[in-house]
Image (cartoon, grey):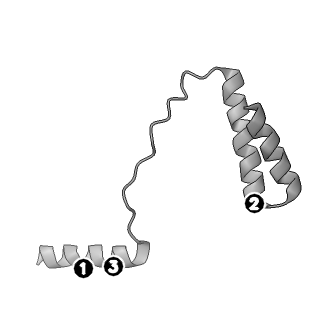
Amino acid sequence: MWERMTHKIKKVAKETLGESRGFRPRGKESWWWDDSVQSKVRIKRDCFKDWSRCKNAETWDKYKIARKRG
């Protein structure tokens, strides 16, 4: 009885929520970066997010400049 109930609960949860592939994030060893490197990476990441939200020439140019600086 418990096995059938467990199977049905898992089935409904899978249909409702979906199933992930189970990948975990890659280990990025950024702990040793100094403040200047971290700030450049943060600026580049923010520029990329801005370009992803609003894909126009202005945001793309800002991202290219940030990418070249970093």
Q: In the image, 68: left or right of 11?
A: right
Say what amino acid the circle numbered 1 marks: Lys
Residue 23 - label: none
In depth, the one of 48 and 3 nearer the eye is 48
| The C terminus - image quarter | top right
Q: Position of residue 40 (x, y in %)?
A: 72, 31
Tell me which residue sits at (77%, 46%) in the image.
47
The residue identified by callout 1 is: 8
Say what amino acid the circle numbered 3 marks: Val
Q: In this view, does 51 lie above or below 41?
A: below
Label 1, label 3: how many angstroms apart (C-alpha)? 6 Å
Considering only order in the chain, which callout, 2 or 3, is on the residue closer to the N terminus? 3
Q: In the image, 59: left or right of 52?
A: right
Residue 35 placement: quadrant: top right
Q: Is residue 27 above or below residue 16?
A: above
In depth, the one of 15 and 39 nearer the eye is 39
Residue 12 - label: 3
In depth, the one of 4 and 64 nearer the eye is 64
Mark 2 vs mark 1, foreground winner is: 2
Label 2, label 1: how many angstroms apart (C-alpha)? 40 Å
The residue identified by callout 2 is: 53
Say what amino acid the circle numbered 2 marks: Arg
Residue 34 placement: quadrant: top right
Q: Where is residue 36 in the image (x, y as percent from the top left)?
A: 71, 23
SS state under label 1? helix
Asked whether the beta carbons under mark 3 and mark 2 sit within 8 Å of each other, the answer is no
Residue 32 placement: quadrant: top right
Q: In the image, 41: left or right of 31?
A: right
Tell me which residue sits at (81%, 52%) in the image.
60
Q: How crowded is mark 3: few (under 14 residues within 10 Å), some or many (20 or more)?
A: few
Asked whether the beta carbons under mark 1 and mark 3 sit within 8 Å of each other, the answer is yes
